[in-house]
């Protein structure tokens, strides 16, 4: 079983920065794709950024240039550096990891979510 644990959310003023972390543990052979998603109140969950094992990154248009997603493969940890935060970035942020476990079975794991509130 693969488990993801997030940390780093909180309250920040507009224009401020936060870094989210997501640590993966369990029976993991390889993590191929990692992602960050968010869900604002009353809205559907949306993709924020993805990072593939080979380093390819994709970002939602509204965060490109402000957010940076990265991963430390050795430590099985994901990061989302968020700069120039705006009130519309307020949401619960979820990390996601897709890969193979030690039995070569596909997994698709989610973190528990961490709340980011951007407000003065």
Image (cartoon, rainbow, N blue to C red):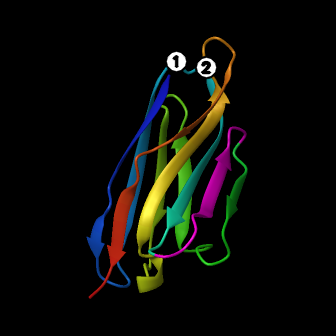
What range of the chain is rendered magenta?
42-54
Contact flag, marks 1 and 2 (Cβ < 8 Å): yes
- Dividing the image into 4 quarters, which one contains the C terminus? bottom left
At which x and y percent is residue 75?
46, 30
Residue 75 in sight from this viewpoint: no
Q: Nearer the viewer, residue 90 or 44?
A: 44
Q: Residue at x 29, y 75 (%)?
A: 12
Task: Residue 54 in the image: state x and y as whole percent.
Answer: 73, 39
> Residue 73 location, x and y as percent?
55, 33
In the image, 27: left or right of 32?
left
**How many C-alpha atoms fall within 10 Å of the one at disc 1: few (<14), some, or many (≥20)?**
some
Query: What mark, if any, has residue 27 been given in the picture?
Result: 1
In the drawing, does residue 41 fall left or right of residue 99? left
Task: Identify the disc placed on residue 77.
Answer: none
Spatial CA span between label 1 and label 2: 5 Å
First in sequence: mark 1 vs mark 2: 1
- Disc 2 crowd rating (10 Å Cα; few below 14, some 14-19, many 20+) is some
Q: Position of residue 71 (x, y in %)?
A: 54, 43
Hey, which residue is sitting farthest front in the picture? Answer: 42
Taking 109 as reference, is 55 above or below it? Answer: below
Residue at 70 percent across and 60 percent down: it is 58
Please name whichever residue, 17 or 25, is drawn nearer the observer in this view of the structure: 25
Please, what secondary structure does the residue beneath circle 2 have? loop
For disc 2, the marked residue is 101
């Amino acid at each position: 079983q693969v488990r993801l644990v997030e940390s780093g959310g909180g309250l920040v003023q507009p224009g401020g920065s936060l870094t989210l972390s997501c640590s993966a543990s369990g029976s993991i052979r390889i993590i191929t794709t990692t992602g960050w998603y968010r869900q604002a109140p009353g809205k559907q969950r949306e993709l924020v950024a993805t990072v593939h094992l080979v380093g390819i990154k994709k970002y939602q248009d509204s965060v490109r240039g402000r957010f940076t997603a990265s991963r430390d493969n050795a430590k099985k940890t994901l990061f989302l550096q968020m700069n120039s935060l705006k009130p519309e970035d307020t949401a619960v942020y979820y990390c996601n990891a897709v890969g193979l476990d030690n039995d070569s079975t596909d997994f698709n794991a989610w973190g528990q979510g961490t709340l980011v509130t951007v407000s003065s």
